[in-house]
Amino acid sequence: MTIFKYEISLDTSKKTEIIDITLDIQEILTKSKLNSGIINIFSKHSTSSIVINENEEGLLYDFESILNKIIPKNNSYKHDFIDNNADSHIKSLFLGSSETIPFSNNDLSIGTWQSVFFVEFDGPRTRKVELTVIGE
């Protein structure tokens, strides 16, 4: 068994932004030269998330829209008295900070319509995503 660690740096440009990082992950997986195993994708920030879903413009719009309806900004959150970004933290809490995906033949084992996304809730910022590849 071999373990590799990599880091992706992302510059976000909006408060909320959904960035497809699937190709970045696949590139790193290819560099690892491992045939099969798992890869963990972890956001190192408490106001962002890693999710898997379909990369379709309407769906991504709906995703952002429904999150903003369920967890609106300026909702008298106690944390807003400190940083004014409680909604960003709560959205991240609900969606999670990581995903683990199997791979085989040096290729991500995701479905035809699945992509891996970094979701920014408190941008614009420079963000770090850590990838841990475990395999053989």
Image (cartoon, rainbow, N blue to C red):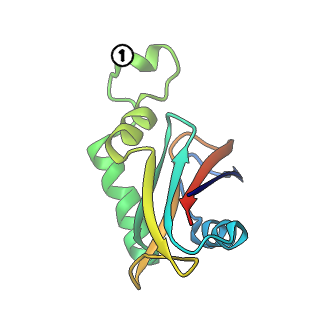
In screen coordinates, is 72 left or right of 121?
Answer: left
Residue 16 appears in view: no
Q: Residue 97's x, y, as percent? A: 45, 44
Is residue 9 positioned above or below 71 on the image?
below
In the rendered image, which quarter contains the N terminus?
bottom right
Tell me if residue 94 can be seen.
yes
Report which residue position mark 1 lands on: 78
The residue that appears at 57% across and 70% down in the rendered structure is 22
Q: Which residue extends farthest front? A: 1
| Quarter-of-image position of residue 88 | top left
Which quadrant of the structure image shows residue 114?
bottom left
* Residue 66 position in % (x across, y down): 30, 55
Q: Residue at x 34, y 50 (%)?
A: 67
Q: Position of residue 25 (x, y in %)?
A: 61, 66
Classed neighbour count for the residue bearing mark 1: other residues with Cα under 10 Å, few (<14), some (14–19), many (≥20): few
Residues 98 and 90: in front is 98
View extreme (left): residue: 70
| Residue at position x 33%, y 22% in the image | 76
In depth, the one of 111 and 63 nearer the eye is 111
| Quarter of the figure with the C terminus | bottom right
Secondary structure at numbered mark 1: helix
Q: Amino acid at mark 1?
A: Lys
